[in-house]
Amino acid sequence: MSSPFLDRYCVVTVTTNDAASPSTNDLLTAVLYGPNFRQEHGFWRRLLTTEPFRRPGGGTPDERLALSYHRLRILNNALDSGARLAADPRALAALHEWLGPVDPALTTVAGIHYNLFLGSLLDHDADTRRDVSDFLALRRVGTFLCTEVAHGNDAAAIETTATYDRERDGFVLHTPHAGAQKFMPNTSPAGGPKSGVVAARLLVDGADHGVFLFLAPLTDAHRALPGVRVRRLPARMGSPVDHCLTSFDRCFVPREALLAGQQGRIGDDGRFHSEVPNRRRRFLTSIGRVTPGKLSMSACAVGSARVTLAIAVRYAGHRMISGSRATRRIPVYAHRTHHGPLAGAMATVYAMSLLHRRALDGWESASETGRDEAERLVAVAKGWITWQARDVIVECRERCGAQGLLENNGMTELVTGIEGAITAEGDNLAVHAKAAAEMVFSATDRDPAEADGPGDLDDPAFLGRLFAAVEHLWFARARTRMSAAPPGDPLGRWNAASSAALRGVEAYAYRQADEAYAAAVATLPQGAARERLTELRRLFALRWIARNSGDLLASGRLTADQVTFLPDAVEDATVVVADHTPALVATFALPERLMSDWPIAGPRYADVYDDPEGAWHRSRRAGIRGRAAEFRRPVCGSRRRPLREKVAALGTRGVLLAYWGTTSVLSRWFEKPQVSVDESVRRKA
Ligand SMILES: Cc1cc2nc3c(=O)[nH]c(=O)nc-3n(C[C@H](O)[C@H](O)[C@H](O)COP(=O)(O)OP(=O)(O)OC[C@H]3O[C@@H](n4cnc5c(N)ncnc54)[C@H](O)[C@@H]3O)c2cc1C
């Protein structure tokens, strides 16, 4: 049987391992994950398909939390060195990219232990001898205590004190009032004894030297240690983590507890020394691990958006609905209302992945002079990517109907989990507001597209200039509004400018994503992969330009005809991308073993709900007595239906099932070898 729909969607992409000419899939996978896919991602991709990381079958919040800590131990045992992981922001990001969609709670505690805790210990003074073996062996789990009840995004103002005690040559940690209690870190004894690096205001001889980090043991296996109080916070939405309130009652720690460095240390003379005069700089240096933390949040969001999109696209292919002719059932993906949003999400997910890699690469390779700008891109990318992920995840959940609301289909934890990524490591809005304040003043007044008249909407370079024009327009608007505000009122001036400046930051993120798209297209050889990426970039660009068409028209960058044509251009680009979206899911390289844990990702999802005691099995019941009526994992194929029924059911549905089934089997066959000696994260010997 043939139909335009089937002809369109039944193009099967086969991955081959021919090293001489990488397949379209391989090329696009390298676009998403970077050129060192196996080295950077192989370990994590393999880990999440092993049994302890497969999806749990429910459980109470405490049981689920215990499972997350259990998985943390298994992960740690699999590593040759937790210190190597902590020292490698790229590996930390990859951990989040792969494990985030599978167990957000595990990712939270792992990110805190390896990045914020161990990473902070490793980054500071190499001269200080510190035994970290308990942390590397996870005999003690590390936590990071910065935020206080009264100080979140303004953490530089925290009030916990660390007073130098010259007699005992150490510090006294103290919480002066309820608002200075540490807020959110996972400091309960759940998952094992905990230690923390505690952000506190260093007081020496009555002088306040700013905020530094101090290493402090917090609990044993059962309770808080003397001088420390730990109380569980109410349950948080999303996957369960033991978030707590933590306070200190004149808790003594030795001099080595100070995480010292060029920003400050106590010398053998008992005096404070620092090479950094500015107290805010000292604080920012101390909490430097927040930047890899932001990259990790972006990675989590990118991974989670990819997984939900993969599930939604696969489900759309085998969820059959009534067609316009009563006799014919069609996959819901056949509808523009369905494949349109999913194609748009595909273009966004590629943009998110590319921007994430751009921010990571830029930050890793930044020179001293370019560091501030690189950190700003990391911060802006974190906000933009996690917000985009929320949109993608919500869209994909909706496109799966009620199935998307059931926990075993893999989306619910991601719907709620993304909220944590939006707020943790600096709330998105506050992070973007900080970038906006910097960029209003640093952005030049020169309009990059000023010299241009309207160009050709088919020209990607022209579309690129429109991205820059939108960014320029919003920052120019912000500056004009700020200049017009009455002087002498800094907050009033900022309030006048901030809405426009935030739009400028958003436009900056879009432009960066488009530039990342352009750079990735340029690396690809002529052929199918380059065509797919060019189509994705075009859809991404046109959707953004359509949103800003009023401004672009008013400023003379677009003609009225172009604005009139834009909705059609977006529609055409959507159709092109939708044609390839089912095949593009394979470029995510999600292991089939992972996908098979989520019933709606497979064509036989309805089998999960079959009931051996149901009336429809009556004639066969004699043979299957004693089987409990329970929900089951999906099975591949079915022996229940006679062959003639299966043949009769063939048609649109049959061919689509064949498509999705074939790609899934082929991807299993052609999955890369599971072991690679050159991986950046190494298995224990
Ligand atoms: C899942 C999760 C895990 C966490 N883990 C840890 C941890 O391990 N250790 C730790 O120390 N902390 C942790 N936190 C706390 C986290 O760092 C803070 O939640 C975050 O810094 C924001 O602080 P807040 O929640 O107090 O928000 P607030 O700072 O109170 O912000 C509230 C609102 O005000 C807005 N706002 C604040 N300041 C500004 C501004 N300058 N301009 C404009 N708007 C502003 C924000 O955008 C937000 O909408 C965690 C949080 C989450 C969600």
Image: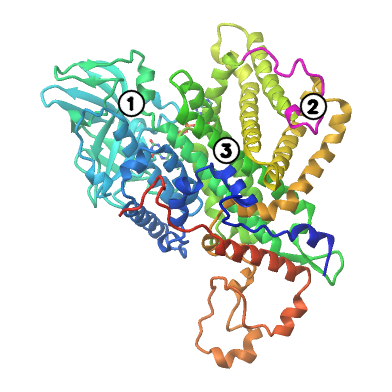
Q: Mark on residue 159?
A: 1
Establish whether ligand 1 lies closer than 8 Å to the Cβ of label 1: no
Instruction: Say left or right for 344 vs 356.
Output: right
Looking at the rendered structure, the kind of residue marked 1 is Glu
Instruction: Say left or right for 478 vs 106.
Output: right
Asked if residue 538 is positioned above or below residue 471 in the image, the reply reads below
Instruction: Say left or right for 578 vs 266.
Output: right
Establish whether ligand 1 lies closer than 8 Å to the Cβ of label 2: no
Q: Mark on residue 385?
A: 3
Among the 4 quarters of the image, the one containing residue 453: top right
Q: Residue furthest left?
A: 167
Prevalent SS, magenta region: loop
Q: Residue furthest bottom?
A: 622
SS at mark 2 in the image: helix
Q: Label 2, label 3: how many angstroms apart (C-alpha)?
A: 25 Å
**Dividing the image into 4 quarters, which one contains the N terminus?**
bottom right
Q: Earlier in the sequence, mark 3 or mark 1?
A: 1
SS at mark 3 in the image: helix
**Dividing the image into 4 quarters, which one contains the C terminus?**
bottom left
Q: Residue 18 at what x, y percent from top left? A: 58, 55
- Please name the residue shown 46% across and 53% down the image: 103
Image depth: mark 3 or mark 1 in front: 3
Q: Earlier in the sequence, mark 1 or mark 2?
A: 1
Label 1 CA crowd tier, 10 Å (few <14, some 14–19, many 20+): many
Q: Residue 651 at what x, y percent from top left? A: 78, 71
* Front one among 239 and 539: 539
The residue wearing badge 2 is 550
Q: Residue 164 at what x, y percent from top left? A: 19, 23
Let me know if residue 470 appears in the view.
yes
Looking at the rendered structure, the kind of residue marked 2 is Gly
Residue 623 is covered by the magenta coloring: no
